[in-house]
Image (cartoon, rainbow, N blue to C red):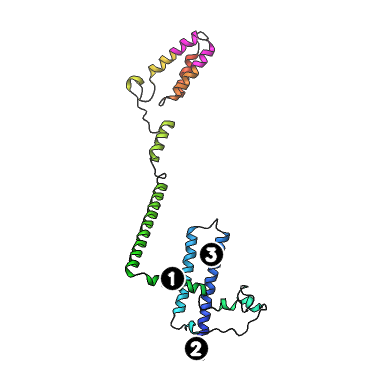
């Protein structure tokens, strides 16, 4: 007898420990749902469900263990019923049951469902027994077909939403080619400085010839001798800007030639 009582106490302690862990997990999850719903993510919800599922499985293993006695064979009899407030009961139940009276005992010590629930369960059992095997099989097939169609529609919607979300993110250009094109247009990077021999004269490719410089100098002299000083300054600035915008030419040499050409031959 003492051995059975010790085994019952050990099983009750293990069961209470598992129930306490499950209660704490439920309380934490409910707190997140009520107070942290704006920061709650779906992976964290799945983690909470996985934790609760694992604790329920552990609780079932404890109940099905071979050393756990059958609690259904144990009878609980209330020895004292009082309408007065019981502080020890309040502490043990964490404030949920303040009194142990005739009103709460049928609810807390009930081993069967409520009479209304029992009547509904009996009615459902009777209706199910009236249905024949063929009719039940047809209803099962119809329900499976409806579920399959619903799952197919849900899967189709998910695929369309995923494809629609990935479509704007698809890259339609090559960043390397774009950067090379921008560098070529803005800075002339990668462009060839080679020019035909007829335009550059006897000089090296990409550099102005001597004939071109002399022709430009004589033209500048004639303009300065016949034009006004303001016109000379505007012409010089226009020539400098045009020559600076052309790739492959050296602005420093051109400025020297322009300066020498701008000197009046009769000012010495």
Q: CA distance from mark 3 to mark 1?
A: 34 Å
In the orientation shown, which residue stands out farthest toward the bottom? 1
Residue at 56% x, 67% y is 27
Residue 226 among magenta residues:
yes
Q: Which residue is mark 2?
A: 4
Nearest-to-viewer mark from 2 and 1: 1
Residue at 53% x, 80% y is 13
Q: Nearer the viewer, residue 265 or 85?
A: 85
Secondary structure category for the residue under label 3: helix
Residue 140 among magenta residues:
no
Image coords of residue 211 (percent x, y): 38, 16
Q: CA distance from mark 2 to mark 3?
A: 37 Å
Q: Earlier in the sequence, mark 2 or mark 3?
A: 2
Stretch in magenta: 219-235
Dot 1, crowdedness within 10 Å: few (<14), some or many (≥20)? few
> Is residue 259 shown to the viewer in this render?
no
Dot 3, crowdedness within 10 Å: few (<14), some or many (≥20)? some
Dot 2, crowdedness within 10 Å: few (<14), some or many (≥20)? few
In the orientation shown, which residue stands out farthest toward the right? 84
Name the image quarter holding residue 168. top left
Compared with residue 91, is residue 216 higher up or lower down, i.e. above or below? above
Q: Which residue is mark 1?
A: 124
> Is residue 245 shown to the viewer in this render?
yes
Chief secondary structure of the magenta span?
A: helix
For residue 182, side relative to residue 99 (left or right): left
Mark sitting on residue 29: 3
Q: Earlier in the sequence, mark 3 or mark 1?
A: 3
Image coords of residue 69 (percent x, y): 47, 84
Q: Nearer the viewer, residue 41 or 115?
A: 115
Image coords of residue 162 (percent x, y): 40, 50
Residue at 38% x, 72% y is 129
Name the image quarter holding residue 169. top left
């Amino acid at each position: 007898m003492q051995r059975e009582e010790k085994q019952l106490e050990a099983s009750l302690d293990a069961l209470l420990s598992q129930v306490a862990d499950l209660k704490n997990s439920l309380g934490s999850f409910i707190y997140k749902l009520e107070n942290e719903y704006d920061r709650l993510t779906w992976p964290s919800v799945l983690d909470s469900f996985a934790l609760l599922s694992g604790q329920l499985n552990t609780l079932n293993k404890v109940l099905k263990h071979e050393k756990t006695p059958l609690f259904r064979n144990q009878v609980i009899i209330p020895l004292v019923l009082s309408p007065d407030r019981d502080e020890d009961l309040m502490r043990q139940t964490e404030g949920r049951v303040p009194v142990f009276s005739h009103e709460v005992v049928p609810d807390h010590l009930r081993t069967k469902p409520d009479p209304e629930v029992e009547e509904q369960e009996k009615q459902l059992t009777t209706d199910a027994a009236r249905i024949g095997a063929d009719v039940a099989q047809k209803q099962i097939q119809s329900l499976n077909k409806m579920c399959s169609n619903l799952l197919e529609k849900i899967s189709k919607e998910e695929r369309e939403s995923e494809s629609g979300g990935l479509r704007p993110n698809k890259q339609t250009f090559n960043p390397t080619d774009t950067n090379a094109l921008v560098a070529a247009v803005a800075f002339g990077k990668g462009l060839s400085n080679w020019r035909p021999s007829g335009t550059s004269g006897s000089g090296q490719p990409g550099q102005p010839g001597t004939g071109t410089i002399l022709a430009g100098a004589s033209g500048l002299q004639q303009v300065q001798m016949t034009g006004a000083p303001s016109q000379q300054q505007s012409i010089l600035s226009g020539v400098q800007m045009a020559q600076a915008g052309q790739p492959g030419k050296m602005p420093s040499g051109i400025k020297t030639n322009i300066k020498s050409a701008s000197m009046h031959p009769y000012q010495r």
